[in-house]
Image (cartoon, grey):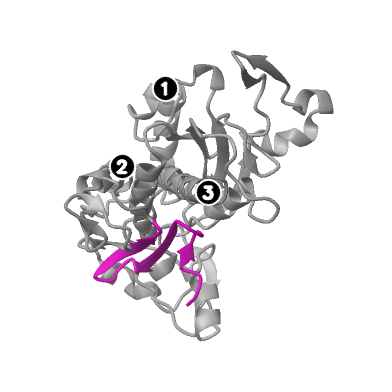
Amino acid sequence: MAGNSFGTLFRLTTWGESHGPAIGVVVDGTPPRIPLAEADIQHWLDRRKPGQSRFTTQRREPDQVKVLSGVFEGLTTGAPIQLLIENVGQRSKDYGEIKDRFRPGHADYTYWAKYGIRDYRGGGRASARETASRVAAGAIARKILGDAVRIRGAVIQMGPHKIDRARWEWEAVEDNPFWCPDRQAAQLWEGFLDEIRKRGSSAGAVIEVVASGVPVGLGEPVYDKLDGDLARAIMTINAVKAVEIGAGFAAAALSGEENADEMRMESGRVRFLANNAGGILGGISTGQDIVVRFAVKPTSSILTPRRTVDIHGHDVDISTKGRHDPCVGIRAVPVGEAMLAVVLADHLLRHRAQCG
């Protein structure tokens, strides 16, 4: 299986399966002499780990990270950094009844059709469990970016229910189990998701991630544009079906006058009067906030019976038991943040290599 690596100078390779003994990541390209401890990584993993509310999978995983290489006396050495996260909460028996059946909307069928074999225990590499490795790599990327760059994410829509942007509070994101910046919307979502969960179904979500303090000049046109790499990075996350940057699809409805981010000089620096471009022009960062939104589909593993087929070519029904996220988009927030950090760190190192 190819395609398990991402990045150019800052490059990560994830490994492991949902119900294997462990998962992890090898991070290559980290500059030497950057302070790094397991606690620096654990902080971000704790934000993603399952079982923190009734609205996420009840699989209990401590997600305790171990640094196996690339760090000596508290500093990165420049060598590859290998991180290990042991799986301790597997319950593979939950999948015994569906091992020969393909979950509609899941990668079961395509994995089996391509490779002739698949790990049916939770989905193997297709499981959201793999994203813990990305969050760990993102923690290292944040160390490269430094404190001047701040990356924050929030859920802005759950199912058909959107937030009111007039009520946006970043402080609210940490005060509810949905990463919601609108306190009133979070209360509505609680009842909505409880109803979804009780009937054995699932809901999708839209996540917005914002990077502030990004310097001007990151990005490599023409084929390695910053927005192109960001879109690809986000699309590699499980269950993501759409990505937009800045105004995104809404830009198609704007006039040229409305869409243009006008500029003025202020204290000797360029100041933009709007940010429809999402902080990127011509594939290069403008110094404004980089704004990325992505849509996550409803979780495919649900209790509601669905029609499908099995590996023997028979028409069958399927109902997935076990512990699953009623809205996997909730735990996608720290994953989206991590992938944004990975892309920015990679392009920061590439910019330094070319432009000094």
Q: How many marks?
A: 3
Q: Nearer the viewer, mark 3 or mark 1?
A: 3
* C-alpha distance separating marks 1 and 2: 19 Å
Name which of mark 3 and mark 1 comes first in the sequence. Answer: 1
Q: Is residue 32 above or below residue 124?
A: above
Q: Is residue 316 above or below residue 226?
A: below
Indicate yes or no whether the magenta region holds residue 14: yes
Residue 250: x %, y % from top left: 72, 34
Q: Is residue 198 left or right of residue 291?
A: left
Q: Nearer the viewer, residue 35 or 43?
A: 35
Q: Residue furthest left?
A: 73
Q: Is residue 330 left or right of residue 163?
A: left
Residue beneath disc 1: 183
Residue beneath disc 3: 347
**The residue tagged with tag 3: helix, strand or loop?**
helix
Q: Nearer the viewer, mark 1 or mark 2?
A: 2
Mark 2 nearby-residue class (10 Å; few <14, some 14–19, many ≥20): some
Q: Which residues are magenta?
A: 1-29
Please report the residue visible at 42 percent of the width from the left and 22 percent of the height from the top.
Answer: 183
Q: Nearer the viewer, residue 288 or 248?
A: 288
Indicate yes or no whether the magenta region holds residue 211: no
Kindly identify which numbered label has been placed on residue 47: 2
Report the amino acid beneath label 1. Answer: Arg
* C-alpha distance separating marks 3 and 1: 35 Å
Residue 5: x %, y % from top left: 46, 66
Q: Nearer the viewer, residue 316 or 294?
A: 294
Q: Residue furthest right?
A: 256
